[in-house]
Amino acid sequence: MLLALVVWVGGIIFFAFVETQTLFHVLPTTKLAGDVVSVSLTKLHWMGMISGLIFLFCSLIYDKLNHNQVKLFALSHIFVLLMLIFTAISQFAITPRMRELRAVLPDTLSPASSSTNRAEFDDLHAWSTRLEGGVLLLGLGVVLWTARRFDSKRANSN
């Protein structure tokens, strides 16, 4: 369970604070950097969705084996479900439209780029960033909750 969460949350941290910052400074054009970010974000989303499903599956089994009951509405399960929903919205609604808009936008931030397409792209980017931030915050909460869950089980067994 922790591995699934660390893959997802760690991927978001790496993507947000290392990859995107580096790409837009190293690559020669913003279009090229955006293309790389788009591919990376898609891979991150799939890693997250698979990790989230693995976490939920393992957590339900853990509850059944250790508590002889399935805690379907545990806070960590609700948080992971929200993380999955946010990720799916970003992957299947926001990202495809951003790709379409990026294909027609000029590569520079010229006055021509202040079109309605640019405004829509900027709005979608803001929503994408909010959703990723929400996934990160919820994920950190689940990591702490899960670590505490294992720690309390260990303390009770001593």
Image (spheres, helix red, strand yellow):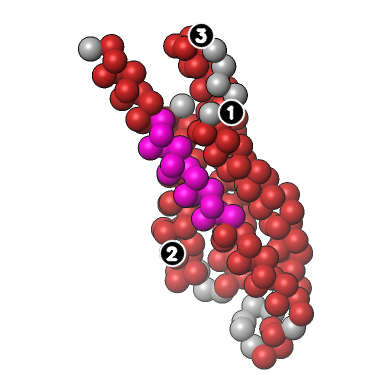
Farthest residue, direction left = 158
Q: Amino acid at mark 3?
A: Asn
Q: Residue 14: percent from the left, percent from the top? A: 43, 52
User: Looking at the image, which is closer to me, 31 or 91?
Assistant: 91
Answer with left or right where residue 119 lies relative to residue 53.
right
Q: Residue at x 53, y 29 (%)?
A: 74
Q: Secondary structure at mark 1?
A: loop
* Mark 2: amino acid: Thr
Contact between marks 2 and 3 (CB within 8 A): the answer is no
Disc 1: which residue: 73
Going from the N terminus, do you reach mark 2 or mark 3 first? Answer: 2
Q: Residue 22 bears which disc, if any? A: 2
| Relative height, residue 130 to residue 139 (above, below) | below
* Residue in front for this viewpoint, 10 or 33: 10
Q: Residue at x 74, y 83 (%)?
A: 115
Decide: few, some or many residues near mark 1? Use Cα within 10 Å; few <14, some 14-19, many ≥20: few
Q: What distance separates the C-alpha of mark 1 from that of mark 3?
A: 15 Å
Question: Which quadrant would residue 110 be assigned to in this image?
Answer: bottom right
Magenta stretch: give its range.
Answer: 131-146
Disc 2 on helix, strand or loop? helix
- Disc 2 to disc 3, how far (Cα)? 48 Å
In the rendering, which numbered label is found on residue 68? 3
The residue under the point 73% across, 49% down is 92
Magenta part mainly helix, strand or loop?
A: helix
| Three-letter amino acid code of the residue under disc 1 | Phe
Residue 155 image offset from top left, x and y in percent = 26, 19
